[in-house]
């Protein structure tokens, strides 16, 4: 767990059309947000293409993708893509992966008999490739024969896992560099998740926080509660039918300022 003051970000929901992303990025950077997060929900917008564009349009934002569904990507191809984005924008890219919505995975013929087994093999292989290792493995789902990246990033980006249940939390703690905790979750839920993950290396804990019905002061207070529970990033999630996303971004910026003032950072 890092001891730094948690970062504050906002989510660009894929219910918004892709052509609105640049304005969203500009607005988030203008209010000094630390991070912008993207979703790869089926069948809306590609996470990696959107992340690359967002990174190119910004200068300070750290851009996360939560989540990339592992059944849709060979881990060698994914590692090659993640390495490329990281080398193009060093230190500003945070990929996160997960099972994917199982109904969607079945819908495209990518469902796994053991989603946990697939995730374990996939994260192990992809993270090893990103760390410059040559990987040979013959698992139930991942089969690689002396695969290595020609251009591994140094250092590699953190590879996070989206987690809810205790098995996935434990997997994130053992194999990944952090985890993404979806809404709804309480600060006590964050604390229990951190304890369950029991990470032995520096571990990012990204928490989504719904913005609906909150003012800047309430958001800032909740951010502080999540930080005390172990969150390293708090990401504000606009409502799906948010009538004024720009106002939500400004609200998040105000809450970040209040939160940072309260921590003296």
Image: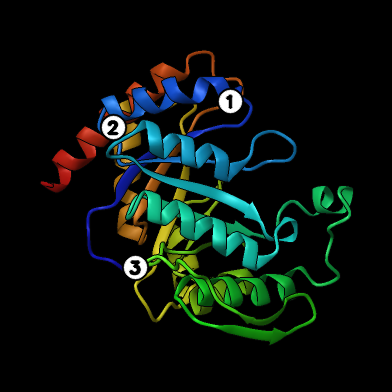
Q: Which residue is mark 3?
A: 155
Coordinates of residue 38 in the picture (x, y in percent): 52, 40
Residue lying at 65% horizontally and 71% vertically, measured from the top left: 122
Q: Which residue is mark 1?
A: 18
Residue lying at 51% horizontally and 57% vertically, measured from the top left: 82
**In the displayed structure, does residue 41 sit left or right of residue 156?**
right
Q: Nearer the viewer, residue 186 or 118?
A: 118
Residue 155 occupies quadrant: bottom left
Q: Nearer the viewer, mark 3 or mark 1?
A: 3
Q: Which residue is mark 2?
A: 255
Q: Nearer the viewer, residue 108 or 181?
A: 108
Q: Measured along the vertical axis of the image, is residue 53 above or below residue 143?
A: above
In this view, which residue lies farthest toward the top? 243
Nearest to N terminus: mark 3 or mark 1: 1
Nearest to N terminus: mark 1 or mark 2: 1
Answer whether labels 3 and 1 touch (C-beta < 8 Å).
Answer: no
Coordinates of residue 252 in the picture (x, y in percent): 34, 30
Number of marks: 3
Q: Secondary structure at mark 1?
A: helix
Q: Measured along the vertical axis of the image, is residue 245 above or below residue 66?
A: above
Quadrant where the N terminus is found in the figure: bottom left
Q: Secondary structure at mark 3?
A: loop
In this view, which residue lies farthest toward the left? 264
Q: Nearer the viewer, mark 1 or mark 2?
A: 1
Residue lying at 64% horizontally and 61% vertically, measured from the top left: 77
Q: Is residue 10 visible?
A: no
The Cα atoms of the two marked residues, 3 and 2, are separated by 32 Å
């Amino acid at each position: 767990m890092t001891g730094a003051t948690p970062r504050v970000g906002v989510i660009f929901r894929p219910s918004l059309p892709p052509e609105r992303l640049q304005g969203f990025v500009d607005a988030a950077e203008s209010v000094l947000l630390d991070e912008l997060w993207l979703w790869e929900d089926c069948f809306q917008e590609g996470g990696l293409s959107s992340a690359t564009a967002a990174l190119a349009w910004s200068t300070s934002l750290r851009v996360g993708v939560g989540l990339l569904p592992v059944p849709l990507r060979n881990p060698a191809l994914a590692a090659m893509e993640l390495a490329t984005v990281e080398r193009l924008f060093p230190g500003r890219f945070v990929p996160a992966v997960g099972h994917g919505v199982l109904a969607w995975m079945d819908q495209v013929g990518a469902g796994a008999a053991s989603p946990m087994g697939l995730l374990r093999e996939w994260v192990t292989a992809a993270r090893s490739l990103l760390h410059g290792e040559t990987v040979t493995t013959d698992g139930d789902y991942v089969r690689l024969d002396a695969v290595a990246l020609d251009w591994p990033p140094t250092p590699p980006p953190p590879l996070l896992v989206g987690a809810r249940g205790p098995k996935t939390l434990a997997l994130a703690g053992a194999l990944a560099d952090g985890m993404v905790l979806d809404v709804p979750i309480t600060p006590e839920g964050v604390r229990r998740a951190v304890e369950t993950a029991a990470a032995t290396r520096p571990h990012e804990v990204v928490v989504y926080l719904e913005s609906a019905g909150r003012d800047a002061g309430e958001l800032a207070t909740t951010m502080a509660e999540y930080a005390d529970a172990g969150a390293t990033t708090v990401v504000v999630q606009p409502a799906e039918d948010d009538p004024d996303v720009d106002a939500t971004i400004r609200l998040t910026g105000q809450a970040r300022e209040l939160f940072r003032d309260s921590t003296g950072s």
